Amino acid sequence: MNDLSADFSQWTAAGEALLPDAIKLRRAIHAEPELGLDTPKTTAKVKAALAGLPLEIREGPSTTGVMALLKGPANGRTVLLRGDMDALPLTEDTGLPFASEISGAMHACGHDTHVAMLAGAARALCEKRDQLTGSVMFMFQPGEEGWHGARFMIEDGLLDPAPDAAFALHISPNMPAGVIASKAGALLASSDKLRIRVKGKGGHASMPHDALDPTPIACEIVLALQTMITRRVSVFDPAVITIAHIEAGTTDNIIPEVARLWGTLRTQSERTRNLAKEGIHRVAENIARAHGAEAEVEIEPGFPVTINDGRVVDLAEQTAKALFGEAGFIRMPHPVMGAEDFSYVLQKVTGAMAWLGGCPEGGDYHTCCALHSNKMVIDEAVMARGIAMHCAMAEAMLSAALEL
Ligand code: NI
């Protein structure tokens, strides 16, 4: 890899200069969170923040997402930066002065900061467009929280022609403020929903031999799935199955006809994902059959594994260290078992995702409230680093520092 010759101090300065605007935008989005693929108020705020910049705005029919293109020299590369826009269905309990005004919706995953940082980066890169050797796509994407927003934007053709490289940041209160953290290969897991329906025969609880009780069969399946995972799946390419919801019966003296199990499957490779899916069918269906009952297994595919390209992670490490010093980058020892729909972009484009530490001031990053908590709080000042990182990564990915 070539050395990074660019003068990155301009990006740290730009991040600091744009921080007050980023905080304002973030707070406005935070107060009015929107869920899913339809986020019109957030989109309006994004467009207002980008107004007057030399960007070509593209939108598709499936989501309220915005692809903003900064055109550079035609013979150059195109790189993509992404920020997700949607909130989560929970009620905020932070007590912040700009807390969500909407009951049952909260930016508990920090996507409000992602939008604000990406809008800041768009402004900074537009101001320095003469220095850029190619084009930059700014992907403002709703529907990350299980709605496949990235996939819909891809299907709408908003990534065509495909960029040469892509980068995204995700803030985390459970990392030291301001550090960038990532790893090559799997960064986040695949995520699939499981639904198992065990059908027996209802009857009187005092005469189980005249019925076919689905409850003990369902319990046996729950335990056997854990055995299947530890005996059939390599510890070096692990999987997690959690049955999180069990439902059967109505009262103490009735054997129900049906027992239902809901859960999640997480893996770090498509190989293990397929192996585990086959195993779930085999174990559930055959345990039910062994007792003369039936099990119907439904596995609803969620996001794929988020797989980082090692070259882009190396570049992110060099970039973060050039911007923030040696302590500015942490190489993660293992993936996180959460999931991300930036995985769809990384299936198509060479790229990487990284975490941005956002532990609140005075907090302990080991114990402070995590993403998806109703009390999740982050240090807004780290958005200055996020803006700088986006800008420097765009410049670096456009340059020969990234060997494609
Ligand atoms: Ni998120």
Image (cartoon, rainbow, N blue to C red):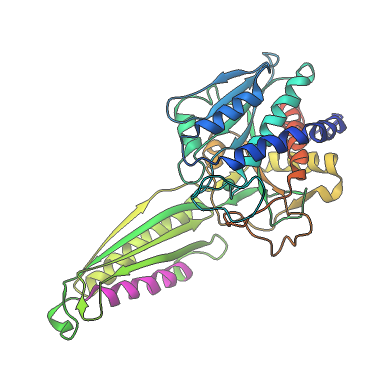
Residue 128 in the image: state x and y as whole percent. Answer: 78, 21
Where does the N terminus fall, quadrant-wise?
A: top right
Point 18% across, 76% down: residue: 212
Is residue 104 among what the camera can see? yes
Point 42% across, 58% down: residue: 275
Give the residue furthest to the left: 210
* Image: 132 above or below 17: above
Residues 48 and 150: in front is: 48
Where does the C terminus fall, quadrant-wise?
A: top right
Point 41% across, 66% down: residue: 243
Is residue 404 among what the camera can see? no
Residue 251, located in which quarter of the rendered image? Answer: bottom left
Check residue 225 for magenta coloring.
yes
Q: Which residues are magenta?
A: 213-230
What secondary structure do most residues of the magenta stretch adopt?
helix
* Image: 179 above or below 290: above
Residues 387 and 96: in front is: 96
